[in-house]
Amino acid sequence: MSPGELWRRLVFLLRRERFREELEEEMRIHQALRAEANRQSGLTHAVAAAASRRTFGNTGAVQDASQDAWGVQWIDALRQDVRYALRTLRKSPAFTTIAVLTLAVGIAATTAMFTVVNAVLLRKLAVRDQDRIVVMSTEDRTSNISRFPFSYGTFTQLRDHSDAFESLAGTDYNGAWSIPGQIGDVATTLRSGIVAGDFFGVLGVRPLLGRVLNAEDDVVGGPHVVVISYGLWRRQFAADPRVLGKTLRLSGGTFAIVGVLPQAFEYPKGADLWTTLALVAPEWEQNPAQPSLDLVARLRVGRTAADAIGEVKSVLQRIVPDGRNWQPVLQSFSDVIVGDVRKEILVLFAATLLVLLLASVNVGGLLLVRGEARMREFAIRSALGAGRVRVIRQLLTESLVLAALGGVIGALAAAFVVHVFPKFAPPDLPRLDNLRLDGAVLAFAFAASLVAALLCGVAPARAVWRADLGHALRAGTQPLAATSWRRFAVAGQIALALLVVAGAGLLTKSLLLLSRVDMGFTSDDLLFVRPVIPPTKYADPQHVRDLMNRLVNRVKTLPGVTSASAVSHLPFSLTGGIDMSYSAEGQDRRAAAVNPPLSYIPTQPTYFRTMGLPIRRGREFSVQDRDGFPLVIIVSEAVARRTWPGADPIGKRLKLGPPEVPGPWRTVVGVAADTRYRSLLNSTATIYVPDLQPPSPDGVWVPAILAIRSPPTLGSLVPSARTALKQVDPDIAVLSAASMNDLIADQLVRPRFNATLLDVLATLALVLAVTGLYGVMGTHVAQRTREMGIRMALGADAASVSSHVILQGMQLALAGCAAGVVAALVGTRVLASLLFGVSPLDPLTLVSATLVLLLAALVASYIPARRATRVDPMVALRYE
Amino acid sequence: MAPNTQRDEIPPGTLDMLILKTLARGSEMHGFAIADAIQQRSANVLQVEEGSLYPALQRMLVKGWIAGEWSRTEGNRRARYYRLTASGRKHLESEIATYRRVAQAISLILKPA
């Protein structure tokens, strides 16, 4: 069919009434003209008109044939079917309500979840040819170091000599840093992405306003310029288009805003602004061996990730002469942006699809039972000349109508969910701003309804196809030969429900374990207060340090406070700490190369007491441990275990960096417990270095966050701390204050969200599966009323009759559970990376899930079984 | 009405061709004129059941072989005037060619031996 023809048919479809009228008129004129011609040839008026009608033929038939010429008869047939279906459904409102709501639940769940899939996973990011962008770091499998950054030197080598990449740039591997800043008069903390080279050019990001940073900006001594995020622009500049040229102050000086980036650009995650490496960390460019960058690269057209890995590997082998077995690791750009949530979202989406499947099968079962009762109607219709196909089309139309109603309710419910979702969703879920009901989502809802209609319509249609309609006409009813199909479907439902329930159980158990995990230090009674330090007033690190000392001393005097200390990083914060490599005395390069990567924590003497972090051996730091005194260090148990297995670590010496790099030796004076300060999931090997001993930390590393331990008064501490800070310096505001337990709770938001959502879906799945079983058993009993009656008349007691029914139900449930356990053993494996402390094959969870289903199945079989025992033998036998 | 001699039904499948040819001869015609013209030109041998003209016209409208437009008749009546489109003309040519081939073949068979 040509496009023109399609268009004409479409126009016809929309203006059918008009076409009909026009044809009517045309035919009228034709007949009038013919009658006129007849009159001219001598006929009387009446005879001429009659003759004209005769030669014209049947105008109704002409109308019909003309309409048919447009090939849209099916629309009429459909309309007729739909009208009939609506009439039939209106006659049984209870059935219709249940069926529509069941489908609505399934469609709403899938559509709502698809909205998230669409926003987070499907919609394109604001970069050009996203598929060719890769983000690179390295790993060393032999020593379990994952995600080790590139040095500036390696970056320039690769950029200038690469064949596999079209272009290449870098970004600070720590992601966006929180740094003190000042916009106008307002001191605040800003998250800064640090970029090297032509970062935005490589990604092909187009600015919303102004320009992006380019390679010319990334030169030491270059202009002080930044580009800001859409969010910061809206928040701090009220989306003012005249923002370009305005300045903001960061710790490194005054920066001019030269551009605003589009909303959909969020890399590094959470960045409020972007500056160049040359401006904020020139020492990294000057010391090209310092590992500091993730590389962002655009593959040349036709080159693969494998090409790139090979090339980068050979460059690394050539220019990094240490003994490590560095492997480049390539991630796609979308993996970097949404990588860790992709699986969670897909798992939840899969669960909603299973719920939709279960809902459709349930409605299919209902339709089947209903179809049985309506066999006589079908038989009559077919006797009156409706073909079997026509009857089946009618049945499918009914399920289509049901699904369409369910789809409308489902889409409305999904719209509501989308509306409230951001309130409940974990705030760190990327790209949530994108969440909305758009064409893709509506198309999905439509497709979901269609699939649901087919799923629930196919079984009744198949049954009618096979049924003996002639017999139905004589006998009135005719059992559809679909019992085995229903039993199979119910067992399948139980299997799928078991899979979802087991998955939910795993996530829930994992959440419980995670919420009870031992942090390694005392997390109760601990508060973190983050002051905002105006960079104009406290320009160099020493000023900040002095200020922090005064603040610490002040809050120590607050009632209830037992200890306080300044710390450099919040727990679980974006970067979470500073990574260091180290070498122990006596280690050669090869041995040092397999040392675990360390978290480096600049520490004040009161740190351990304040954190409630136990010192296992040796001593904590004292005020004596400062510049000019012997260099000391405290290591975590993991460092001690790995470096000096079986030996006493106290008195051993190590230094920061690899063995061949000159550096002072530091003596281990204490061993602290391992903590999960950086990540709730893992404890990190850590070294604690006195804040006042070299390496003299630069501005970013000065401990500038207050940790306060205050057992009795934690709740009321925040306002008094705020006042205390103001007393030290009226310009100091509090940016954020959170207890350690709050921070842990934040970490649990996403696992809890996932677990809760999957629990809800599992409950739905369970209810649907059990309802399905109940339906089958109910029909089973109803069909066997006579048989039950005979049994009871022959002396069977109620118990044996009901246990017979229950046994039937439990057989189905057991078959389903067996299949479900197999499905779970295979299926829950995808959850592995989402689980904490529990194996996907956890036997306890699997057994519990099976028991839950069997118990529910027992209830679902018991109710029909009781009904069976109430059969009055006489009534049952007289029946029929 | 013209004197009645023997009247034949239009052979199946040829109505479209006859209509197209009629339109190709004249410029724009309404339905009655088309029916009349077919009858006249066939010397009243071919009888169009006049109503059957309209589904055929609709069919050809869908295909885009003809286009229709409302206009006034000489007697100042409103009527839909049909005209041949370029694709209709092309279709007519191929129809005629096919018809000629078939008719020739048939007449070869029917030729008295």
Image (cartoon, rainbow, N blue to C red):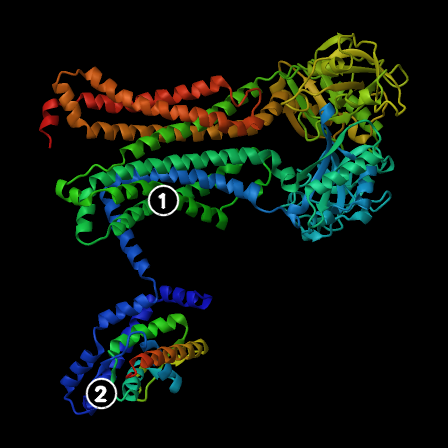
Q: Residue at position x 75%, y 24% from top?
A: A597
- Nearer to us in this view, A391 or A37: A391
Image-quadrant location for residue A684: top right
Residue A94 against residue B41 in the figure, above or below = above
Name the residue that disc number 1 marks.
A454
The picture places residue A20, in percent across and down from the top left corner, at 30, 70
Residue furthest front as drawn: B113
Relative placement, left or right, of A630 versus A447 is: right
For disc 1, the neighbor class at 10 Å (few under 14, some 14 to 19, many from 20) is some
Q: Residues within 10 Å of mark 2 (few under 14, many from 20)?
A: some
Horizontal and vertical percent position of residue A198: 77, 47
Q: Quadrant of residue A575?
A: top right
Q: What residue is rendered at 45% in x and 78% in y?
A: B86
Gap in Å between the C-alphas at discs 2 and 1? Answer: 58 Å
Residue A716 in which image quadrant: top right
Q: Is residue A224 visible?
A: no
Residues at badges 2 and 1 in contact (C-beta under 8 Å)?
no
Q: Report in which chain the residue with disc 2 lies.
A: A
Residue linked to disc 2: A36
Q: Which of the image's four quarters has the C terminus of chain A?
A: top left
Q: Amino acid at mark 2?
A: Glu
Where is the N terminus of chain A found, in terms of image quarters? bottom left
Answer left or right for A418 relative to B105. right
Q: Given the image, what chain letter belongs to the residue carrying mark 1? A: A
Element assignment for label 2: helix
Badge 2 and badge 1 both on one subunit: yes
Please provide percent x and percent y for residue B24: 39, 84
Q: Secondary structure at mark 1?
A: helix
Work out whether mark 2 precedes mark 1 in sequence or the reverse, and give the earlier one: 2
Circle 1: residue type = Leu
